[in-house]
Image (tube, grey):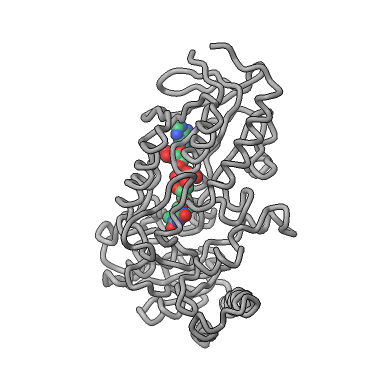
Amino acid sequence: MKYVTTVIIGAGQAGLAMSKHLIDRSIDHVLLERGEVANSWRKERWDSLRLLTPNWQSRLPGYAYRGSDPDGYMDMPEVIRFLQGYADHIDAPVETGTNVTSVRQADDGYVVATDCGTWRCQSLVLANGACNVATVPGIAEGLPPKIRSLTPKQYRNADQLEAGGVMVVGASATGVQLAKEIQDSGRQVTLSVGEHVRAPRLYRGRDIKWWMDVTGVMDMHYTEVDDIKRARRVPSLQLVGSPDRATLDLNALRESGVEIVGRLAGIRNGQAQFSGSLGNQCALADLKMNRLLDAIDAWVSANGMDSDFEPAHRFEPTRIDAAPSLAMDLIDGRVNTVIWATGYRPDYSWLEVPVLDRKGRLRHDGGVVDAPGMYVMGLPFLRRRKSSFIDGVGDDARDLADHLCAYLGGHTRIAA
Ligand SMILES: Cc1cc2nc3c(=O)[nH]c(=O)nc-3n(C[C@H](O)[C@H](O)[C@H](O)COP(=O)(O)OP(=O)(O)OC[C@H]3O[C@@H](n4cnc5c(N)ncnc54)[C@H](O)[C@@H]3O)c2cc1C
């Protein structure tokens, strides 16, 4: 058994940002990482993925992007180098190749079992990621057996798919990016669209992420939100980080030839059935996008900066077919593959502490888990709207490290 004051599970951006704050506060700790630093970016993303956040927004405590292309978007090798560089820079005490297999409460702390031995600690930070598992709705069980079903974690590139049609379910960042790539590979894509968040890549000459940053949208605190449960479930923006800084909304996908249909409501007798709510979903997404643009325009005017940017304008509403398909045959051979871009969730199957609610979600208040000395990081809107982003974990790590320090101050440290 090894002893340490704090165990951090996971060496992605969240674990590393917390490590930096613990180093600054002289709290001895270890990061237990089942793979290598930045493992999720190394192993769980598709080949062509680039960050949808611009390079200048890759900021971690005491470290930031310093390359020659601040407005570009990192590809995966660059993200891995960036995070590994950070781990080296702060000299993070990472134990790689160490899979945490169980965590249980012990007197005044936790026992963390791994495939490389057991650790005893007083406080624990769960930085194991918000996207460990790709969620697939129960209706997937109705798929005819000859249809190949893939999650974004299994998808690497279009070459891995047979010829023939592909249905992508879900139109948030992952769904629109995969739909475009697969359509461009020569396969006919049908994109099933439910609730989504439309956003232009550029507005008034600046990246939408720049606007959301300067206007304070990303800094919004979880205590300021009326319905935080709902805010934590809001889908990701329809964005892609491409060298041409193109917008990837449903209009752009239609122009590429993607067929847009409504939310997948069921699969019965080999037929996919789509909801008739596509028009409403698109109108709502347009309305919300325009509200964001209104807020940006108001901020520009309030700061007397109208002449500093291109004039305000609005984008064409989302175009949909007059009568979008409400059903699609899944046995006539036109569709061979379904990709479930229907979201992600964390995996806490190894957590033997009673801190999960009925839906398997962690009970926490802004990252302070409902168990003594236990913290979580990296979940959507954990403390701020930016919490799950590279640019957001730093502020959360600072707040939670302060809380952890105060907690330890009131507790005797474990003797080694
Ligand atoms: C497809 C996709 C695109 C994204 N694009 C962007 C973007 O453009 N910009 C941006 O800012 N954010 C983006 N994000 C969101 C977010 O930045 C990433 O999800 C990021 O990986 C989260 O960092 P993290 O440290 O919280 O978790 P992770 O990077 O997932 O790190 C968690 C670590 O914990 C380890 N781990 C998990 N379980 C165990 C265990 N039991 N034992 C030991 N180790 C374990 C994992 O191996 C992993 O290394 C994207 C997310 C996804 C899914």
Does the rendering let one see residue 333? no
- Residue 318 percent location from the top left of the image: 52, 82
Q: Residue at x 54, y 18 (%)?
A: 120
- Report the number of numbered marks: 0
Using residue 48 as the reference point, say whether residue 142 is left or right of it. right
Using the image, determine if residue 141 lies above or below residue 407. Answer: below
Q: Quadrant of residue 296?
A: bottom right
Using residue 67 as the reference point, say whether residue 389 is left or right of it. right
Q: Residue at x 44, y 37 (%)?
A: 11
Q: Residue at x 66, y 38 (%)?
A: 368
> Camera-side residue: 233 or 194?
233
- Residue 411 percent location from the top left of the image: 68, 20
Does the rendering let one see residue 139? yes
Using residue 292 as the reference point, say whether residue 14 is left or right of it. left
- Residue 386 percent location from the top left of the image: 56, 55
> Camera-side residue: 16 or 127?
16
Using the image, determine if residue 377 lies above or below residue 31. Answer: below
- Residue 389 percent location from the top left of the image: 50, 53
Q: Residue at x 46, y 30 (%)?
A: 31
> Camera-side residue: 262 or 357?
357
